[in-house]
Image: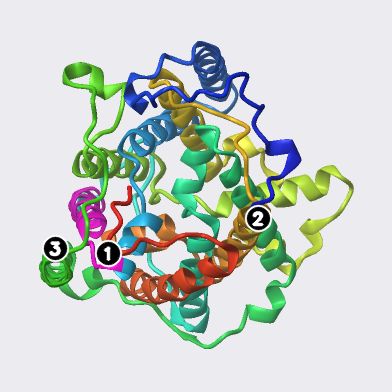
Amino acid sequence: MSTTLPFLRPPSPAVTSVPAPVPEDLQPVRRAPLLIASLGSLALTGYVWAEHGAKQGVLLLLGLGLGIALFHSRFGFTSAWRQLVAVGNGTGLRAHALLLGTTATLFALIIGTGTGLFGTAPQPSGGDLGVALLAGAFLFGIGMQLGGACASGTLFAVGSGQSTILLTLGGFIAGSILYSWQFDLVDDLPSVPGVLLSDHLGWFGSWAVTLAALAGIVALTRAVQARRTPPPVGAVPTARGPVRAVRGSWPLLAGALVLAVLGGAVLLVSGGAWGITSAFALWGAKFLQFIGLHPETWSYWEQPKQAQMLAGPVLADKTSLTDIGIMLGAAVASAAGGAWTLHRGMPWRTAVAAVLGGIIMGVGARLAGGCNIGAYLAGIASGSLHGWLWGAVALAGTWVGLRARTLFGLANPAPKDSVC
């Protein structure tokens, strides 16, 4: 018999009869959450714009757009890799390829021409190749399967009120704190300088090689899927026409295109690629300072870049702004679509897996210098070898993570299932 955490147990039903479920995109609008999220978004955007400038205000708006797109398309990295490894369904990975290819095209145009707004000089996202990258990506692959979401998925799920993922976010922040506290233990792991294709082939050559590699991956996933004949994923939406933009699901490929455009805009505005997890370390450190501790004395926060981040306000930090925007955007989108919910029952083993998965991802993301967004998406789109290595090793971690899920009573896709 499953035990449910008392503070997350839903109220007992008043009647014994169970009505037929209403399709998600035909649920009534959740007016109170929609009003709170909308007014909160407007007020915060106005404050950030007035206090920190137009650049920061635009970044928050871009985060709102990312949250809306992530929620409506349910664009997942965790579920895509789970489906591929468990039953050979490459639908999600092909959506990744479209996201990666479109983002790479925009990056080549923006960085290759030196086009930036607000006086920025857009730069590619590169990273060293070494033990930390491999260990971090492997851990992240395990953690996201236990935690039930990747970095971007954690944020949009929290915004839509999913209580399990709130525990994952808490674990994510705790893991980031743990890494920054023990930074000296892993600071000198063996590595070699990273490789940017644009340094050797130019931006056109880098773009062409990236697209060719992605085309090969698409062909490979189709071959695997044809041989294993997995069940389909996703449900047919009931909303039709223009209302589908705010009610119900978007096609995965549409979500990939919208996310790529918004991610390119983040690069254009800030000069750096879209990222997520560095903010979790910052939030954790700010919390420790609030309760009287001194993380600023740790080696990690004494580095010039990190020291500047910690000394500044959270609402001036690029990554924090887009992260907060994602949660608010997902809250607006889920409430408008009638899907916002809170206080779901949760088996204790699921809660433990969520926290543990979050901690593992927090450590892994900092070890690897990024997550599924900051390392995988930004790295591959920049023509950096470290992004490809991150993806390959995280996929191996996914294989281990699927087996670890069974220890916590978490289900995996099976050939006979039709899993969303």
Check if residue 365 falls in the magenta segment. no
The residue lying at 13 percent from left, 63 percent from top is: 211
The residue lying at 53 percent from left, 71 percent from top is: 404
Q: Is there any visible trace of residue 384 in the rendered image? A: no
Residue 98 lies, with reference to residue 6, above or below; the image says below
Q: Position of residue 242 (x, y in %)?
A: 19, 17
| Residue range of the region highlighted in magenta in the rendering | 87-111
Q: Is there any visible trace of residue 345 in the rendered image? A: yes
Q: Secondary structure at mark 1?
A: loop
Check if residue 100 falls in the magenta segment. yes
Label disc, if present, on residue 415 of the rendered structure: 1
Q: Nearer the viewer, mark 1 or mark 2?
A: 1
Three-letter amino acid code of the residue under disc 1: Pro
Label disc, if present, on residue 211 of the rendered structure: 3
Q: Earlier in the sequence, mark 1 or mark 2?
A: 2
| Disc 2: CA contacts within 10 A as few (<14), some (14-19) or many (>=20) | many
Q: Earlier in the sequence, mark 1 or mark 3?
A: 3
Tell which of 260 and 120 is nearer to you. Answer: 260
Quadrant containing the N terminus is bottom right
